[in-house]
Image (spheres, rainbow, N blue to C red):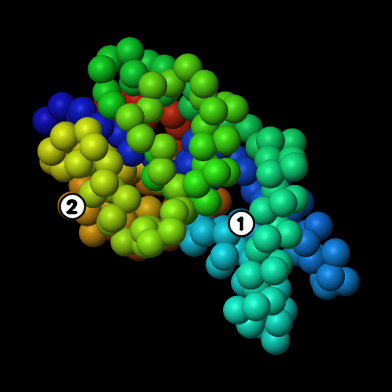
Amino acid sequence: MRIELAIFDLDGTLLDTVGDLAAASNRMLALRGLPEHSYDDYCRFVGNGILRLVERALPEELRTPEYVAAARADFIRFYLEAIDRYTKPYAGIPELLAEAARRGVRLAVASNKFQQGTEQLVRRFFPAIPFAAVLGQRPDVPLKPDPAVVEEILARTGIPRERALFVGDSGIDMQTARAAGVRSVGVTWGFRSREELRQAGADVLVDRSEELLRLL
């Protein structure tokens, strides 16, 4: 059946963002005199939104609501100051999106990153791509793996779920697709392992953007 809609996760799927997320988080920690973390640590920390990233970066004894809220505010300030210093699209992604759009496939972004950051990165790196929706974390909208964001995109586009794909790099993304009743594609170039994607029930795994394009 022809695919009419491709919904993409952002971090780890379209963009390699860990370098800037790690830098902002480590600046937040250094401001407080706390131990910093490695790039590999942040690959494990990301995926559930900024609040959880900040919680995971902080020592356990400091993870009170008040402390986390203050740390999150500092993180966002630092992140927005240098959101694209290290971030870059994965190989072949700009070309993939342009070709999919040329073929008439509707495109959307569904991220657990906060809305302002999601929109800023999409504008910066994919200014010519006609996304039908660019949705990040917003108040009163549950994060993935809740399917609410996928349901919203399906409603906006009017495309049946059987003609949609959800593309992501994590088990959370595969769980989101399953909860929404859409087919899932796990990309192996992101932050998580092939085994995590398999265990989360990915319908298809792809190693290169050209393989993904063949599915569209």
Task: Spot the residue most to the top.
Answer: 102
* Numbered badge on residue 89: none
Judged from the image, the secondary structure of the residue bearing numbered disc 1 is helix
Judged from the image, the secondary structure of the residue bearing numbered disc 2 is loop
For the question of whether residue 189 can be seen, the reply is no
In the rendered view, would you say 16 is above or below 59?
above
Q: What residue is drawn where x is 79% and y is 66%?
A: 29
Which is nearer the eye, 199 or 45? 45
Crowd rating for badge 2 (residues with CA inside 10 Å; few <14, some 14–19, many 20+): some
x and y percent of residue 178 in the render? 24, 56
Q: In which quadrant of the rendered view does residue 44 lie?
A: bottom right
Q: What residue is drawn where x is 31% and y is 43%?
A: 166
Q: Is residue 62 left or right of residue 157?
A: right
In the rendered view, would you say 211 is above or below 146?
above
Q: Amino acid at mark 1?
A: Cys
First-in-chain label (1 vs 2): 1
All told, the count of numbered labels is 2
Which is nearer the eye, 151 or 104? 151
x and y percent of residue 154 in the render? 22, 41
The quadrant of the image that shows the C terminus is: top left
Which is nearer the eye, 191 or 84? 84
**Disc 1 vs disc 2: which is toward the camera?**
2
Q: Which residue is mark 2?
A: 181
**Label 1, label 2: how far apart the Cα atoms are:** 27 Å
Q: What residue is drawn where x is 49% and y is 61%?
A: 48
Q: Which residue is mark 1?
A: 43
Crowd rating for badge 1 (residues with CA inside 10 Å; few <14, some 14–19, many 20+): some
Q: Amino acid at mark 2?
A: Gly
Q: Is residue 183 left or right of residue 90?
A: left
x and y percent of residue 109 in the render? 40, 39
